[in-house]
Amino acid sequence: MKIEILCTGDEILSGKTVNTNYSYMARRLHETGFSVFWGTVVGDDRDGLVQAFQQASERADVVIVNGGLGPTVDDLSQEIAAAAAGVELVLHQEWLGRIAAWYQARGRTMPPNNHKQAMLPEGAEFIDNPVGTACGFALTIHSARFFFTPGVPSELQRMLEEQILPRLQGMRGTRVATRVKRFHTFGIGESRADQLLDGVEELAPGSRVKLGFQSHYPQLEIKLTANAGSETELDRILSPVEEAVRQRLHPFILAENGDTVEGVIIDNLKNREASLSVLEMDTGGAIAGRLIRAADTKARIRQGLIAVDNEEIARILELDPGDGRETDERFAALCARKLRIRSGSTYALAVLMSRPGTGPDHPPCASIYFALSGKSGTFNRKTTLPGTRNWVLRGATEMGMDYLRRHLLGLPTDERNDFEQH
C-alpha cells in the first residue's frame, strides 16, 4: 500500500509554521507497518491544490490530506475534493448540529462562516472529530482513497489514532500488531550507543526487530520496532532485545516509553516520602520547572530558586558576603546545605555555572558545579560543557536532572559522559 501525506496551507509552505503534523503522521504510519512514499506541501491555492490532488490520486493508494477544513475563505479542501471527484458539496446536517452544540457548550454563538465546515462532498464517508469543529471525511478520487484531516495537531492526532489507522488496517486485509519500544538516554552519543548495541537485533527470534536512533540533544532516543501477528508474539520477539538494551546501556537510560526523567525523580521522592528544593544559576529555573510540571509534585518540590550571580545567591540564602567570592565546588556545596536547612526539604540540589575567558585560546565552554545535600551528606560534581550558550544550558539542565536521578537510584554520579569536555 503506497501512502502519500499531503499537507496544505500557506503558513506551512512559507515556513512560518513548522510542519509537526507531517512528522507525527509519518512516524505513526511507520510504527504501524505502513510505508509513506511521498510527502507534499501545497499552499492555499486552487490551481495548486487541484494539481496536487490529481498527482496524488495517480500514484498513491491512500492520500492523507491535512489542513484546509476550517471556516475561512482560504480553507479549500472540501471544495477541491468535490471538484476532483466530480461531485457537489452537500450539507451534513448532523455535523452542523454538532458545531452549534460545540459553541453552545462554551457559551458562544456559532458564527455564520462555520456553516462551511458542514459542507462535504456528496457520497463522502464521515470521519468523526470529537474535539473540534472541523469535520473529517474520506473520499475516493480516481483509484486512491483520500482521508481529509484538520490542521489542529490535537484534532489530527485523535482522528488518526481512532479513525484513520483502523481503516487502513482494514484496507490492508491482514491484522498486523506493531510496537515501538523507546529508551530515553542521556550522556551517551549515537556512535557509542551503536557500538554497545551491536548485534542486539539478532537476539530476537527470527531477527524481526529493527533498531533505530533519534538524537534530540541532550537526549538520545533508542527505538526498537517490531511487527507480528499478535501482542503475545510481540512480547516474545521484543523481550530478549529489551533486556539486552537495559543491560548494555545501564545506567544511561533515563526512562522508557512515555516516562520521563522528571517522572522517575518524582516517583522516587514520593516512594521515599521525601521533598526537594532546587537552586539554579543561568538555567532559568528549567530543572525546577520540569519537576513542578511533573505529576503529583505538590508535596515534593518545596522551593525553586533562580539567581544570576553569587552575590544574589548569598543574599537569598543569607550567607556571609565573602562566601561567594568564587563559583566552585565549595560554594555549590554550601548553597545546597543552606537551602536544604532553610527550606526544610529532604534534599537540595544546587546547579551553578561559571564561564572562563573567551578567545582563540578559550573555545566556548562553561564550568558547571552540581551539589546535592541530603541527610547522609553533601555530594559534589564538576564538569565542563563545550558549545554555545544555548547548547550548554540545555546540557547543564539535563545533566542536573541526571545527577539527581543517579543519586536517588544509587547509581554512579561521577561517570563521565560523552558530552563533557575531557
Image (spheres, rainbow, N blue to C red):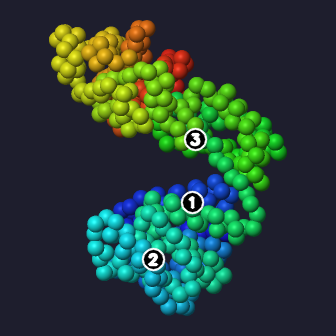
Secondary structure at numbered mark 1 = helix
N-term-proximal mark, 3 vs 2: 2
Q: Is residue 354 left or right of residue 120?
A: left
Q: Is residue 198 left or right of residue 137?
A: right
Q: Residue at x 67, y 33 (%)?
A: 245
Secondary structure at numbered mark 2 = helix
Q: Amino acid at mark 3?
A: Asn
Residue 372: mark: none
Characterize the local packing of mark 3: few (<14), some (14-19) or many (20 or more) Cα atoms within 10 angstroms.
few
Q: Quadrant of residue 281?
A: top left
Q: Vertical placement of 235 versus 99: above or below?
A: above
Q: Look at mark 2 in the image and give the residue it sits on.
A: 95
Could you say which is closer to the camera, residue 104 or residue 176?
104
Q: Quadrant of residue 171?
A: bottom right
Could you say which is closer to the camera, residue 167 or residue 393?
167
Q: Is residue 101 left or right of residue 220?
A: left
Q: Look at mark 3 in the image and give the residue it sits on.
A: 257
Q: Quadrant of residue 312?
A: top left
N-term-proximal mark, 2 vs 1: 2
What separation in Å lies between label 3 and label 2 (alpha carbons)?
A: 37 Å
N-term-proximal mark, 1 vs 3: 1
Q: Amino acid at mark 1?
A: Glu
What separation in Å lies between label 1 and label 3 (alpha carbons)?
A: 18 Å
Q: Residue at x 75, y 35 (%)?
A: 240
Q: Look at mark 1 in the image and give the residue it sits on.
A: 161
What separation in Å lies between label 2 and label 1 (alpha carbons)?
A: 20 Å
Give coordinates of residue 368: x percent, y percent.
Answer: 37, 23
Give coordinates of residue 365: x percent, y percent.
Answer: 37, 28
Q: Check the picture and name the quadrant holding the N terminus.
A: bottom right
